[in-house]
Image: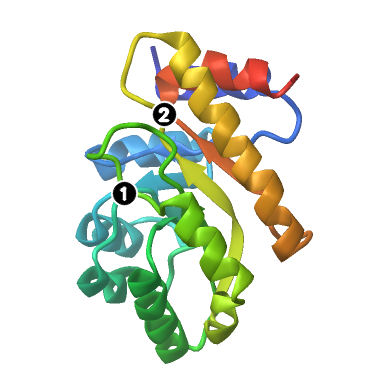
Protein backbone atom coordinates (compact mmCIF):
# COMPACT_ATOMS: atom_id res chain seq x y z
CA UNK A 1 0.00 0.00 0.00
CA UNK A 2 1.27 3.48 -0.90
CA UNK A 3 2.42 5.60 2.04
CA UNK A 4 0.00 8.41 1.12
CA UNK A 5 -2.98 6.04 1.07
CA UNK A 6 -2.03 4.47 4.40
CA UNK A 7 -1.65 7.85 6.10
CA UNK A 8 -5.04 9.02 4.87
CA UNK A 9 -6.70 5.80 6.08
CA UNK A 10 -5.12 6.11 9.52
CA UNK A 11 -6.08 9.77 9.86
CA UNK A 12 -9.68 8.97 9.00
CA UNK A 13 -9.78 6.28 11.70
CA UNK A 14 -8.15 8.30 14.49
CA UNK A 15 -10.35 9.28 17.43
CA UNK A 16 -10.51 12.99 18.20
CA UNK A 17 -7.49 14.19 20.17
CA UNK A 18 -5.16 11.42 18.93
CA UNK A 19 -2.04 12.48 17.01
CA UNK A 20 -0.41 10.29 14.38
CA UNK A 21 3.35 9.84 14.80
CA UNK A 22 5.00 8.18 11.80
CA UNK A 23 7.93 6.06 12.96
CA UNK A 24 10.52 6.74 10.31
CA UNK A 25 13.51 4.97 11.86
CA UNK A 26 15.45 2.83 9.38
CA UNK A 27 13.42 4.29 6.49
CA UNK A 28 15.16 6.36 3.80
CA UNK A 29 14.59 10.07 3.37
CA UNK A 30 12.62 9.38 0.18
CA UNK A 31 9.93 7.53 2.16
CA UNK A 32 9.71 10.37 4.66
CA UNK A 33 9.29 12.86 1.80
CA UNK A 34 6.37 10.80 0.46
CA UNK A 35 4.70 10.89 3.87
CA UNK A 36 5.49 14.60 4.20
CA UNK A 37 3.85 15.36 0.86
CA UNK A 38 0.76 13.50 2.12
CA UNK A 39 0.57 16.00 4.99
CA UNK A 40 2.40 14.10 7.74
CA UNK A 41 4.61 16.32 9.88
CA UNK A 42 5.49 14.34 13.04
CA UNK A 43 8.14 11.62 12.69
CA UNK A 44 9.78 9.36 15.29
CA UNK A 45 13.42 8.26 15.31
CA UNK A 46 15.32 6.04 17.75
CA UNK A 47 18.95 6.80 16.84
CA UNK A 48 20.29 10.33 17.44
CA UNK A 49 22.83 10.26 14.61
CA UNK A 50 20.22 9.06 12.11
CA UNK A 51 17.82 11.72 13.35
CA UNK A 52 20.47 14.40 12.92
CA UNK A 53 21.21 13.34 9.34
CA UNK A 54 17.53 13.37 8.40
CA UNK A 55 16.96 16.73 10.07
CA UNK A 56 19.74 18.24 7.97
CA UNK A 57 18.40 16.73 4.72
CA UNK A 58 14.64 17.24 5.10
CA UNK A 59 12.18 20.16 5.45
CA UNK A 60 12.63 22.17 8.62
CA UNK A 61 8.94 22.23 9.60
CA UNK A 62 9.06 18.51 10.45
CA UNK A 63 8.44 17.69 14.13
CA UNK A 64 11.15 15.23 15.15
CA UNK A 65 10.40 12.94 18.09
CA UNK A 66 13.11 10.93 19.84
CA UNK A 67 11.36 7.68 20.70
CA UNK A 68 14.20 5.29 21.57
CA UNK A 69 16.40 4.90 24.61
CA UNK A 70 18.58 8.00 24.76
CA UNK A 71 22.13 7.82 26.08
CA UNK A 72 23.38 10.93 27.85
CA UNK A 73 26.34 11.31 25.50
CA UNK A 74 23.98 11.46 22.50
CA UNK A 75 21.70 14.27 23.74
CA UNK A 76 23.97 16.89 22.15
CA UNK A 77 23.17 15.58 18.67
CA UNK A 78 19.45 16.34 18.92
CA UNK A 79 19.14 19.14 21.49
CA UNK A 80 19.25 22.02 18.96
CA UNK A 81 16.13 20.94 17.04
CA UNK A 82 14.26 17.95 18.53
CA UNK A 83 10.57 18.67 19.05
CA UNK A 84 9.89 16.07 21.73
CA UNK A 85 12.03 13.56 23.64
CA UNK A 86 9.66 10.71 24.48
CA UNK A 87 12.16 8.68 26.49
CA UNK A 88 13.17 10.70 29.56
CA UNK A 89 13.76 7.77 31.89
CA UNK A 90 16.13 8.90 34.68
CA UNK A 91 17.38 11.83 36.74
CA UNK A 92 20.77 11.48 35.08
CA UNK A 93 19.28 11.90 31.61
CA UNK A 94 17.17 14.84 32.80
CA UNK A 95 20.30 16.60 34.04
CA UNK A 96 22.02 16.18 30.66
CA UNK A 97 18.97 17.32 28.68
CA UNK A 98 18.86 20.40 30.91
CA UNK A 99 22.54 21.09 30.30
CA UNK A 100 22.28 20.76 26.52
CA UNK A 101 18.99 22.69 26.32
CA UNK A 102 20.48 25.59 28.26
CA UNK A 103 23.48 25.56 25.93
CA UNK A 104 21.11 25.81 22.95
CA UNK A 105 19.02 28.49 24.67
CA UNK A 106 15.79 26.56 24.31
CA UNK A 107 13.27 24.61 26.36
CA UNK A 108 12.92 20.97 25.30
CA UNK A 109 9.59 19.17 25.62
CA UNK A 110 9.86 15.68 27.12
CA UNK A 111 7.72 12.69 28.05
CA UNK A 112 8.47 10.67 31.17
CA UNK A 113 9.06 7.07 30.12
CA UNK A 114 7.56 4.83 32.80
CA UNK A 115 8.24 1.13 33.28
CA UNK A 116 4.84 -0.59 33.60
CA UNK A 117 5.64 -4.17 32.55
CA UNK A 118 7.17 -7.16 34.31
CA UNK A 119 9.99 -7.30 31.73
CA UNK A 120 13.30 -6.15 33.15
CA UNK A 121 14.61 -5.48 29.63
CA UNK A 122 12.20 -2.57 29.17
CA UNK A 123 13.56 0.85 30.09
CA UNK A 124 11.76 3.55 32.04
CA UNK A 125 11.40 5.10 35.48
CA UNK A 126 10.32 2.93 38.36
CA UNK A 127 7.05 4.68 39.16
CA UNK A 128 7.52 4.80 42.93
CA UNK A 129 10.97 6.34 42.50
CA UNK A 130 9.63 8.83 39.97
CA UNK A 131 6.81 9.90 42.29
CA UNK A 132 9.24 10.40 45.15
CA UNK A 133 11.33 12.64 42.89
CA UNK A 134 8.24 14.56 41.74
CA UNK A 135 6.94 15.09 45.29
CA UNK A 136 10.33 16.53 46.21
CA UNK A 137 9.89 18.98 43.30
CA UNK A 138 12.98 17.51 41.66
CA UNK A 139 12.17 18.86 38.20
CA UNK A 140 12.24 22.44 39.48
CA UNK A 141 16.01 22.37 39.01
CA UNK A 142 15.55 21.78 35.27
CA UNK A 143 13.93 24.97 33.89
CA UNK A 144 14.91 24.10 30.31
CA UNK A 145 12.76 20.94 30.35
CA UNK A 146 9.00 21.09 29.89
CA UNK A 147 7.24 17.88 30.85
CA UNK A 148 4.41 17.16 28.43
CA UNK A 149 3.22 13.73 29.57
CA UNK A 150 4.20 10.08 29.81
CA UNK A 151 5.25 7.28 27.49
CA UNK A 152 5.36 3.54 28.03
CA UNK A 153 5.54 0.18 26.30
CA UNK A 154 3.39 -2.84 27.06
CA UNK A 155 4.61 -6.35 27.78
CA UNK A 156 5.67 -8.22 24.62
CA UNK A 157 2.93 -10.83 24.52
CA UNK A 158 -0.04 -12.01 22.46
CA UNK A 159 -2.19 -11.87 25.61
CA UNK A 160 -4.38 -8.83 25.00
CA UNK A 161 -5.52 -8.74 28.64
CA UNK A 162 -1.92 -8.25 29.80
CA UNK A 163 -1.31 -5.49 27.26
CA UNK A 164 -4.56 -3.77 28.20
CA UNK A 165 -3.64 -3.92 31.90
CA UNK A 166 -0.24 -2.36 31.18
CA UNK A 167 -1.83 0.50 29.28
CA UNK A 168 -4.45 1.09 31.98
CA UNK A 169 -1.62 1.26 34.53
CA UNK A 170 0.20 3.79 32.37
CA UNK A 171 -2.95 5.87 31.97
CA UNK A 172 -3.33 5.86 35.75
CA UNK A 173 0.24 7.16 36.10
CA UNK A 174 -0.52 9.91 33.60
CA UNK A 175 -3.64 11.00 35.46
CA UNK A 176 -1.82 11.16 38.79
CA UNK A 177 1.16 13.07 37.41
CA UNK A 178 -1.05 15.56 35.59
CA UNK A 179 -2.10 16.86 38.98
CA UNK A 180 1.48 17.99 39.58
CA UNK A 181 2.25 19.53 36.17
CA UNK A 182 -0.99 21.12 35.01
CA UNK A 183 -2.50 21.81 31.60
CA UNK A 184 0.73 21.57 29.60
CA UNK A 185 1.00 17.93 30.72
CA UNK A 186 -1.26 16.73 27.92
CA UNK A 187 0.31 13.73 26.15
CA UNK A 188 -0.15 10.00 26.74
CA UNK A 189 2.03 7.98 24.34
CA UNK A 190 1.46 4.22 24.48
CA UNK A 191 2.64 1.16 22.64
CA UNK A 192 3.43 0.45 19.01
CA UNK A 193 1.49 0.08 15.77
CA UNK A 194 0.20 -3.41 16.58
CA UNK A 195 -1.27 -2.08 19.83
CA UNK A 196 -3.40 0.50 18.05
CA UNK A 197 -6.74 -1.40 18.21
CA UNK A 198 -6.36 -1.80 21.99
CA UNK A 199 -5.47 1.85 22.49
CA UNK A 200 -8.51 3.05 20.56
CA UNK A 201 -10.81 1.06 22.85
CA UNK A 202 -9.09 2.55 25.89
CA UNK A 203 -9.97 5.98 24.56
CA UNK A 204 -13.62 5.22 25.21
CA UNK A 205 -13.19 3.81 28.72
Residue 154: image tag: 2
- Using the rendered image of the protein, determine whether residue 68 is visible from the camera's viewpoint: yes
Side of 82 relative to 143 (left or right)? left
Circle 2: element type: loop
Tell me which residue sits at (78%, 59%) in the image: 183
The color scheme shown is rainbow
Measuring from the top left, give residue 60's x and y in whole percent: 46, 62
Measuring from the top left, give residue 131's x and y in whole percent: 56, 60
Measuring from the top left, give residue 151's x and y in whole percent: 49, 45
> Quarter of the image containing the C terminus?
top right
Disc 1 target residue: 68
Q: Mark 1 or mark 2: which is in front?
A: 2
- In terms of image quadrants, where is residue 24? top left
Distance from Cα at disc 1 to Cα at disc 2: 15 Å
Tell me which residue sits at (44%, 53%) in the image: 65
Residue 47: image tag: none
Tell me which residue sits at (50%, 38%) in the image: 21
Image vertical order of residue 201 relative to residue 152, above or below: above
Circle 1: element type: loop
Q: Check disc 2: other Cα within 10 Å, few if <14, some if 14-19, many if 20+.
A: many
Image vertical order of residue 151 relative to residue 22, above or below: below
Amino acid sequence: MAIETKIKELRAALPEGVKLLAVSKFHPAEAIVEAYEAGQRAFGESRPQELKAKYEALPKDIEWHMIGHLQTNKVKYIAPYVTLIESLDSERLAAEIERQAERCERVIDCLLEIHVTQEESKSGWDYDSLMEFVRQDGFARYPHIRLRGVMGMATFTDNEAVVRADFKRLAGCYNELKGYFGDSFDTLSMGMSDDYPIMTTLQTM
